[in-house]
């Protein structure tokens, strides 16, 4: 999930107005202008929403050569936040994320393709719970430009659904986990 933060791939969706550039994700310790949010079924009755507060990474983007773009996102599974400390503590145990044994998660792109209309197809390796699998999702540009902080930023969003059973996590009654990635990068 961490790298799933796949959301990072979303950054590449920034098709448009800049030449090749390197960006650092504005996440943990920055301004926290990036997030990986999730939704899971709660007892098959309603949805449990949460996020990972520890999101870092970087991406490169070239509007004139989208295929040369790359993204890498790290997620700290121990930074899970469901707005209830007791639940977060349980989710960090061996029953679910097992953060002691698997302290990292994340996404590294292997291919990025221009789909037109501000959309990109992002493919890469997502690692969660010690298991790595290829995933693919669509990301869109949410904007780019000078910020009031004296730097240039670009943003992307994307959504993916993963089956956590494929990663060795038993999530009942439904193993599907929806991840929403909102990534903001600061040009270096």
Image (cartoon, grey):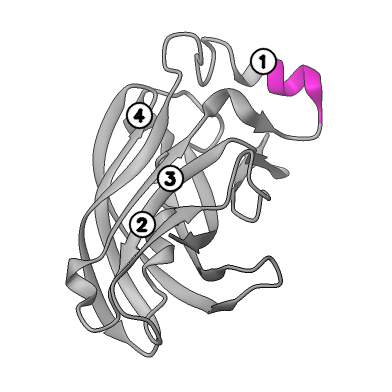
Give the mark toward the camera: 3 or 4.
Answer: 3
Q: Is residue 169 above or below residue 43?
A: above
Do labels 3 and 2 touch, CB within 8 Å? yes
Distance between mark 3 and mark 4 Cα atoms? 22 Å
User: What residue is at 42 percent from the left and 9 percent from the top?
Assistant: 101
What residue did someone put label 4 on? Answer: 167
Element type at mark 2: strand
What segment is highlighted magenta in the picture?
84-89
Q: Which mark is residue 57?
A: 3
Q: Mark 4 and mark 2 in contact (Cβ < 8 Å)?
A: no
Residue 9 in which image quadrant: bottom left
Q: Which residue position is annotated with label 2?
A: 59
Q: Nearer the viewer, residue 47 or 130?
A: 130
* Residue bearing the label numbered 1: 90
Q: Is tag 2's residue or tag 1's residue first in the polypeptide sequence?
A: 2
> In what quadrant of the picture does the N terminus appear?
top left
Which one is earlier in the sequence, the residue at label 2 or at label 4?
2
Q: Residues within 10 Å of mark 2 (few under 14, many from 20)?
A: many
Mark-to-mark CA distance, 2 and 4: 25 Å
């Amino acid at each position: 999930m961490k790298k799933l933060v796949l959301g990072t791939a979303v950054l590449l969706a920034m098709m448009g107005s800049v030449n090749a550039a390197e960006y650092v994700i504005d996440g943990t310790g920055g301004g926290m202008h990036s997030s990986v949010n999730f939704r899971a079924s709660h007892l098959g009755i309603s949805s449990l929403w949460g996020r990972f507060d520890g999101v870092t990474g970087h991406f490169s983007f070239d509007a004139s050569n989208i295929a040369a773009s790359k993204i890498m996102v790290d997620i700290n599974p121990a930074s899970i936040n469901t707005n209830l400390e007791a639940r977060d503590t349980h989710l960090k145990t061996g029953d679910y994320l097992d953060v002691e044994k698997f302290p990292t998660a994340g996404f590294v792109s292997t291919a990025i393709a221009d789909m037109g209309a501000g959309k990109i197809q992002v493919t890469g390796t997502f690692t969660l719970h010690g298991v790595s699998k290829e995933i693919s999702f669509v990301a869109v540009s949410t904007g780019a430009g000078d910020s009031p902080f004296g730097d240039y930023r670009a943003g992307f969003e994307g959504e993916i659904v993963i089956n956590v059973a494929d990663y060795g996590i038993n999530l009942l009654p439904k193993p599907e986990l929806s991840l929403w990635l909102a990534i903001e990068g600061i040009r270096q």
